[in-house]
């Protein structure tokens, strides 16, 4: 396990009511539409946004990702804190394969706070990597900032279309 801890903070202001942004973060069908970086779909998406609720997503790389097309990137996790329209905290990890019982090679804790700005919503996402091990971890960490930013771009686009 790496001794250094990697962190990422992303702050966005969405032109959408906080209720809508919250729904986009807690409704499994909406998560399935925007989760993951560009070029990725989510054929499997289980997202039970309640304390102790489980997360299991399999991201599938599309042809726009070139040589990565067809690759599956599974993750699992658990919600630790859910304060409606205010805060989500979940721990999750990237899996070695789509078997839910497989080992994680990266684990992270994600905190997402939502602030009402009178018709707009400020979202602050803070992620802390808590575990890295194995040969897949360095490449995943290298793409983390870009991937999460693309994911937030996709969320913003979804909110613009008023889910």
Image (cartoon, rainbow, N blue to C red):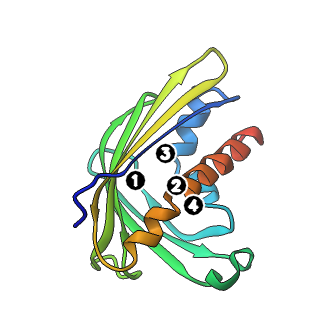
Q: Position of residue 82 (x, y in %)?
A: 35, 38
**Against 2, is 149 above or below?**
above
User: Marks 4 and 1: which is nearer the front?
Assistant: 4
Label 3 crowding class (10 Å Cα cut-off): few <14, some 14-19, many 20+? some
- The answer to which of marks 4 and 3 sits earlier in the sequence is 3
Residue 46 falls in which quadrant of the image? bottom left
- Residue 48's disc is 1
State the residue position of label 2. 28
**Against 16, is 32 above or below?**
below
State the residue position of label 3. 26
- The answer to which of marks 1 and 2 sits earlier in the sequence is 2
Image quarter in which the N terminus is found: bottom left
- The answer to which of marks 1 and 3 sits earlier in the sequence is 3
Q: Single out the residue that lies furthest toward the right.
A: 161
Q: Position of residue 95 (x, y in %)?
A: 36, 74
* Real-space Cα separation, disc 2 to disc 4, in angstroms: 14 Å
* Real-space Cα separation, disc 4 to disc 1, in angstroms: 17 Å
Label 3 sits on a secondary structure element that is helix
Label 1 sits on a secondary structure element that is loop
Label 2 sits on a secondary structure element that is helix
- Residue 36's disc is 4
């Amino acid at each position: 396990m790496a001794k250094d801890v990697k962190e990422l903070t992303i702050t966005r202001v969405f032109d959408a009511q906080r209720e809508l942004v919250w729904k986009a973060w807690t409704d499994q069908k909406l998560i399935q539409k925007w989760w993951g970086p560009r070029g990725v779909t989510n054929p499997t998406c289980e997202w039970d946004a309640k304390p102790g609720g489980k997360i299991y997503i399999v991201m599938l790389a599309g042809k726009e990702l070139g040589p990565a097309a067809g690759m599956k990137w599974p993750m699992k996790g658990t919600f630790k804190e859910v304060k409606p329209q205010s805060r989500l905290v979940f721990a999750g990890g990237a899996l070695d394969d789509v078997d839910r019982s497989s080992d994680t090679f990266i684990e992270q804790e994600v905190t997402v706070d939502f602030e009402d700005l009178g018709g707009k919503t400020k979202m602050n996402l803070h992620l802390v990597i808590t575990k890295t091990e194995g040969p897949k971890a360095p490449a995943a960490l290298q793409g983390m900032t870009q991937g999460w930013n693309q994911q937030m771009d996709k969320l913003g686009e979804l909110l613009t279309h008023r889910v």
